């Protein structure tokens, strides 16, 4: 790479790192932050930006409006690299991950292959494809066992995901995640870093762009036409009454480079949780892209994917 290009790239990455650090996101994906800073939401408007303060204020108001009156508990994280905007709403609150953790499992699998100086083998590729594009629980369990807790923990440390707590034993679905850490994870997937190679990042993002049509709800809803999406959703009924419904997504192309995380719990139904997520997603997409034609919801959710097959303890 030419020296001038390297210098420009380094400056760009440094600027992004400073912005993330100021909002409690990682200063460096390979160096975990010592502790979370105060959530921006606690100071008033949930969105902050030194370069686009007016847009950040409008976006924060829109997110607050989208959450107003909703039943349950919600956390939100938004990071726009281009506009240097960070939004956080209760971003350190922990949630049962459900299937969202499958994206992190694949990250750890890819990191293992990098450290072993090899490509994914055919079995790993087959399991990864099923786990991400169809949210296959058996595939996730197989990769969870294969990569092991030590390597999972190592990946979390390298990615700066210091608030994430792995689920007990084989119960990957009870991994405790936060909106802050999920933004950190998406940041690792969407920019050059020392955790994952460019090839590894493109591989996982490619799978997240091939999620089956019935699982494309959530953060992609309302995105601008022509902007690429990469999504992983999770949904899990607990205690026979309440749901955990989550969506993480990154968006690129047509000059865009941003990510959205919405985590919910204690919602009365899966559909209700999805609608809460989509209200936030529409607010973010529309404020960041006021002059672009937006898309509507792309799928009808099907709750049959999230079953208790070992991902969570029975009867809980």
Image: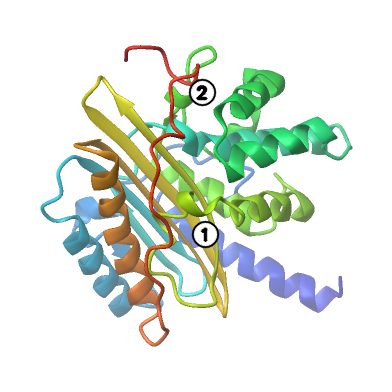
Residue at point 43%, 39% (across, down)? 234
Q: Secondary structure at mark 2?
A: helix
Residue extending farthest bottom: 291
CA distance separating discs 1 and 2: 23 Å
Residue that badge 2 annotates: 172
Residue 137 coordinates in the image, percent (x, y): 55, 28
Q: Is residue 281 above or below residue 12?
A: above
Q: Secondary structure at mark 1?
A: strand
Can residue 279 be spotted in the picture?
yes
**On-image quarter of the C terminus:** top left
What is the quadrant of residue 263 in the picture?
top left
| Label drawn at residue 250 | 1
Residue at point 21%, 55% (across, down)? 43
Q: Is residue 219 above or below residue 268?
A: below
Q: Is residue 146 above or below residue 34?
A: above
Residue 124 coordinates in the image, percent (x, y): 76, 33
Residue 253 coordinates in the image, percent (x, y): 59, 74
The residue carrying pointer 2 sits among few (fewer than 14), some (14 to 19) or many (20 or more) residues within 10 Å by Cα, namely many
Can residue 153 be spotted in the picture?
no
Residue at point 66%, 18% (across, down)? 145
What is the quadrant of residue 123 in the picture?
top right
- Mark 1 in CB contact with mark 2 (< 8 angstroms): no
Residue 72 coordinates in the image, percent (x, y): 18, 40
Observer-nearest of 28 and 82? 82
On the rendered structure, is 190 left or right of 298?
right
**On-image quarter of the N terminus:** bottom right
């Amino acid at each position: 790479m030419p020296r001038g290009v390297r210098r420009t790239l380094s400056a760009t990455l440094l600027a992004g790192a400073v912005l993330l650090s100021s909002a409690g996101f990682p200063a460096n994906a390979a160096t975990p932050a010592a502790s979370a800073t105060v959530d921006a939401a606690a100071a008033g408007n949930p969105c902050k930006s030194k370069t686009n303060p007016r847009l950040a204020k409008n976006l924060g108001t829109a997110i607050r409006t989208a959450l107003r009156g909703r039943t349950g508990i919600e956390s939100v994280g938004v990071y726009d690299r281009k506009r240097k905007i960070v939004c956080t709403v209760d971003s350190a609150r922990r949630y049962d991950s459900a299937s969202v953790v499958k994206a992190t499992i694949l990250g750890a699998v890819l990191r293992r292959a990098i450290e072993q100086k090899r490509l994914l083998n055919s079995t790993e590729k087959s399991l990864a494809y099923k786990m991400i594009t169809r949210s296959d629980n058996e595939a996730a369990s197989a990769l969870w066992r294969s990569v092991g807790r030590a390597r999972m923990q190592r990946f979390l440390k390298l990615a700066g995901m210091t608030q994430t707590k792995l689920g007990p034993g084989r119960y990957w679905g009870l991994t405790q995640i936060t909106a802050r850490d999920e933004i950190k994870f998406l940041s690792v997937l969407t920019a050059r870093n020392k955790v994952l190679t460019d090839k590894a990042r493109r591989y996982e993002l490619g799978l997240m762009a091939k999620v089956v049509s019935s699982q494309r709800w959530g953060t992609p809803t309302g995105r601008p036409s022509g902007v690429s999406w990469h999504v992983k959703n999770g949904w899990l009924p607990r205690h026979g009454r309440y749901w955990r419904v989550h969506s993480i997504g990154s968006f690129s192309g047509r000059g865009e480079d941003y990510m959205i995380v919405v985590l919910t719990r204690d919602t009365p139904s899966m559909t209700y949780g999805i609608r809460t997520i989509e209200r936030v997603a529409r607010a973010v997409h529309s404020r960041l892209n006021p002059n672009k034609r937006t898309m509507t919801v792309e799928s009808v959710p099907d709750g049959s994917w999230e079953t208790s097959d070992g991902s969570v303890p029975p009867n809980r």
